[in-house]
Image (cartoon, rainbow, N blue to C red):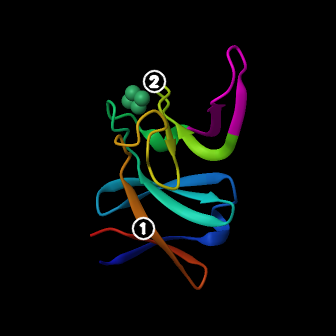
Amino acid sequence: MPINYVANAGDIPEGTNIIVDVKGLSIGVYNIGGEFFALLNRCPHEGAPLCKGKICGTTLPSGVYQYEYGRVGELVRCPWHGWEFEIRTGKAIFDEKVRAKSYKVQVDDGKVGIVVG
Ligand code: FES
């Protein structure tokens, strides 16, 4: 599968993302704790530009009327209806069978590449 280099690693600080075009696809590239991940910039719900959503955390399972917030910086929240997805895997928080499409990312000599077939 061809690697498409889209940025220098230093151009994507930890906790941020950029949106790039690769072969006609809009793809968000994320730096989470120094690791890079890529998601298709299209929400599987109704097609919103998912990667324009906020990088966030979520409420964790907790007691009744207790709202514990965690996983900060690991998720992206869709800007249209608020569905939350794991940036590392693309899985939706509420149902792991629902996924944003993800791509393999490879860093070579400080260059971030996305594997798109
Ligand atoms: S389009 Fe993303 S949650 Fe609805």
The answer to whether 36 appears left or right of 24 in the picture is right
Q: Earlier in the sequence, mark 2 or mark 1?
A: 2
- Residue 59 belongs to magenta span: yes
Give the quarter of the image for residue 111. bottom right
- Residue positioned most to the front: 63
Q: Secondary structure at mark 2?
A: loop
Towards the viewer: 20 or 43: 43
Identify residue for label 2: 81
Q: Kindly report the distance in space between the C-alpha atoms of the residues bearing marks 2 and 1.
A: 26 Å
Q: Secondary structure at mark 1?
A: strand
Going by the numbered disc 2, the residue's amino acid type is His
Percent of width and height locating residue 23: 29, 63
Please say if 79 is above or below 13: above
Percent of width and height locating residue 45: 34, 32
Q: Is mark 1 within 8 Å of ligand 1?
A: no
Q: Quadrant of ligand 1?
A: top left
Percent of width and height locating residue 90: 44, 49
- Residue positioned most to the bottom: 109
Binning the other alpha carbons within 10 Å of mark 1 as few (below 14), some (14 to 19) or many (20 upward) gives: some
| Residue at (38% x, 77% y) in the render | 3
The quadrant of the rendering that contains the C terminus is bottom left
| Residue at (64% x, 58% y) in the render | 32
Labels 2 & 1 near each other (Cβ < 8 A):
no
The quadrant of the rendering that contains the N terminus is bottom left
| Residue at (70% x, 58% y) in the render | 14
| Residue at (52% x, 50% y) in the render | 87
Please say if 69 is above or below 116: above
Identify residue for label 1: 104
Give the quarter of the image for residue 48. top left
Q: How many marks?
A: 2
Instruction: Report the magenta residues as a range.
Output: 54-70
Q: Is mark 2 within 8 Å of ligand 1?
A: yes
